[in-house]
Image (tube, rainbow, N blue to C red):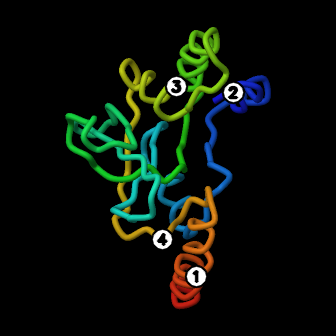
Amino acid sequence: MYSLYCAREEIDGNFLLLESDLIYEQRALETVLDFPEDNVILLSGPTNAGDEVYVATSGKTIVAMSKDKTKLSNPIAGELVGISKISKPLFEIMLDRARIKFANSLKVDYETDTLVDAAKSYPVYYKVVEDLLWSEIDDRQHLLRAKEEIYPAIDKKERICQ
């Protein structure tokens, strides 16, 4: 969140928040851009990739996120992909939450520490794409999975769609 906080003066409207360590199908972006509400996070079905962030929901909005499913009391709608559409008003609430948390540490997660907190007072919707091909690349195992499984599957699928 601190990196996003540092960019706050450059952000003057709604924006896409894209985690930088992802590989994904083109339709991931299209799905978020086409979503009718100003705030949405993209979720996928189960990936079994390790390091998943599960998203609990109520109705059409998010209520919690955790890497530990057992800590979520609401139904889990899917796994956080790391692609979100954020409105300026939501961003302002996230910044307010971040400022408070920065008093203790600059290590603040945008997802669990500010976005979920902001969603308590401002609606953050979600969209699930069950069969989305994507991967986060945090370590060697993730990289191997991305290179050997995910990228070839994305390439094959998008060639067929052309």
Residue denoted by label 1: 148
Determine the CA span between mark 2 and mark 1.
Answer: 33 Å
Residue 133: image tag: 4
Q: Amino acid at mark 4?
A: Leu
Q: Look at the numbered disc 3 and give the secondary structure of its residue.
A: helix
Mark toward the start of the polypeptide (2 vs 3): 2
Q: Amino acid at mark 1?
A: Glu
Q: Amino acid at mark 3?
A: Leu
The residue sitting at 61% across, 65% down in the picture is 23
Camera-nearest label, 1 or 3: 1
Mark toward the start of the polypeptide (2 vs 1): 2
> Within 10 Å of the Cα at label 3, are there few (<14), some (14-19), or many (20+) other Cα atoms?
many
Q: Look at the numbered disc 4 and give the secondary structure of its residue.
A: loop
Residue 90: image tag: 3
Determine the CA span between mark 1 and mark 3.
Answer: 37 Å
Circle 2/circle 1 CB separation < 8 Å: no
Determine the CA span between mark 2 and mark 3.
Answer: 16 Å
The residue sitting at 35% across, 56% down in the picture is 128
Residue 2: image tag: 2
The residue sitting at 62% across, 49% down in the picture is 19
Camera-nearest label, 4 or 2: 2
Mark toward the start of the polypeptide (3 vs 4): 3
Image quadrant assignment for residue 29 = bottom right
